[in-house]
Image (spheres, rainbow, N blue to C red):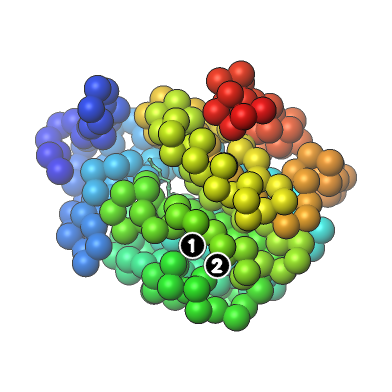
Amino acid sequence: MKIDSWIFEAHDDMKHGYKVKDILYHQQSKYQEVVVLETEGYGKALYLDGLLMLTEKHEFFYHDVIVHPAMFVHKNPEYVLIIGGGDGGSLREVLKHKEVKKVDMVEIDEKVVEASKKFFPTLNIGFDNPKANIMFDDGIKFVKETNNKYDIIIVDSSDPIGPAEGLFNEDFYRNAYKSLKEDGIIVSQVESPLFYEKFFKAHFEMNRKIFPIAMPMIGFEPDYPYGMWGYSFLSRKYHPLNDFNEDKVINSDIKTRYYNIEVHKALFAYPNFVRDLIGE
Ligand code: SPD
């Protein structure tokens, strides 16, 4: 990865960049290149294999969406599994929910957690929480082998190339389905419908064969190319709108910077090209 006064996440026909002040961490782990930079205007940034995972300034857009809609729709989310999520952002948001009794986090790469512990004080606040159980293991293997049953599974992965590739295939989702209680919900990051159209379409075709409810959430995430970001809401029972009890949000003291009742509903309001992609 080339880093000088600018850093670019480069794709075939476009690139997305930030002005760099300093390189704080640059290591090749067993799995990927892990880089933490101090940027000029966006705080610290985490890159894995040259792809931007987050900036301190804007990570809340992503972590609010990957966590809160499912946590508020579920009637009593006590047991949560996070696959990936080594920066700690999803764990921080899950732990805001008082019903939570235990969070298992399965991160493949210890270096990502190490980088977060050293450089991301606003993200790493959950690692020492007594409800959090951090495991360094392969999430694919974990869901295949575990007998645990979770209320919520959050797949906070990197992109579908490199170590996270297997987190997007059918075997993984069939095993994850079995690791849910009968009213469990899975939320995954599924890239941008503008950028990975075929992948996005295939993800929902595949998951409609597994889950009674498999719906996209379309959010905004300025850290990523194009800004429009997709997540999947895969549910064994609860519908994200019909079973959404707004009072649960109104009566909660959880502070969020992006998520609210109207944003929750808007995540399921699809532009026409997304409707076409998912065959609606
Ligand atoms: N293109 C970037 C997709 C990365 C999604 N995961 C981000 C991890 C933040 N916890």
Q: Which residue is mark 2?
A: 175
Residue at (73%, 57%) from the top-left corner? 236
The amino acid at mark 2 is Asn
Q: Is residue 36 visible?
A: no
Where residue 229 appears, x then y in whole percent? 50, 34
Q: Are marks 2 and 1 in contact (CB under 8 Å)?
A: yes
Residue at (65%, 61%) from the top-left corner? 152
Local crowd size for mark 1, using a 10 Å CA cut-off: few (<14), some (14–19), many (≥20): some
Q: Nearer the viewer, residue 154 or 179?
A: 179
Q: Quadrant of residue 110?
A: bottom left
Q: Residue furthest front?
A: 209
Q: Secondary structure at mark 1?
A: helix
Q: Is residue 266 above or below residue 251?
A: above
Mark seen at residue 171 = 1
Where residue 259 appears, x then y in whole percent? 66, 38
Where residue 16 appears, x then y in whole percent? 29, 28
Q: Secondary structure at mark 2?
A: helix
